[in-house]
Image: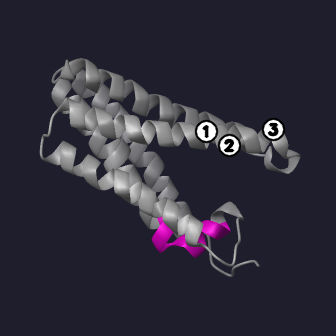
Amino acid sequence: MESEASPRAASLLFTLTIIATMAGVFLAILLYFYDRQLSVRTAAFFLVGIVGTLSFIRHSVCYRSDQARMAWFQERPEFQIEVGFGNLALAVPALAASLLAWGPLACGMMLLSYGVYILCTLGLHIRNAAADPARRKGAGARIGNTAFFASSLLVFAALAFSLAG
């Protein structure tokens, strides 16, 4: 069943996700040389809080547009909406940990949790590209982007844990 929804909203949200990721990585690296505590709070805020919130909106609120963007049409989108809820479940405590200064351990746990989640999606992208020749188009970019994001999350998690002691 194909949807008549436009991919425009989901594409915009995905672009904003990429911008938030790049801003978060850049600012967290910059801040690391001046204030390491603020660096990991910034990483948690952008890379989990903002990215997770945008992903929730894309997957759960704009799910028909997201289906059109991914060419992934289904009559029962509950699973896709549930993925959005998972993103939100990680985003909200990450926003709280970073904004309320709960410390590097809390920020590190949020970065690690989202990093493991994104690492699993990386495995899925690799599996799909290997198993289905039709899915190989664009797989290199998807795999590279996802690997960069997962690596960023896990590196900042390690930095946060090193600050926590």
Disc 3: which residue:
130
Q: Residue at x 40, y 40 (%)?
A: 113
Identified by mark 2, the residue type is His
Point out which mark residue 46 bears: none
Q: Earlier in the sequence, mark 3 or mark 1?
A: 1
Q: Is residue 66 magenta?
A: yes
Q: Looking at the picture, how far across and down is residue 123, in whole percent?
A: 64, 37
Q: Is residue 4 above or below residue 21?
A: below
User: Where on the picture, by quarter, is residue 138?
Assistant: top right
In contact (CB < 8 Å): disc 2 and disc 3: no
Q: Residue at x 75, y 77 (%)?
A: 2
CA–CA distance in space, label 2 to label 3: 9 Å
Disc 1: which residue:
122
Q: Residue at x 71, y 71 (%)?
A: 73
Q: Earlier in the sequence, mark 2 or mark 3?
A: 2
Majority SS type along the magenta span: helix
In contact (CB < 8 Å): disc 1 and disc 2: yes
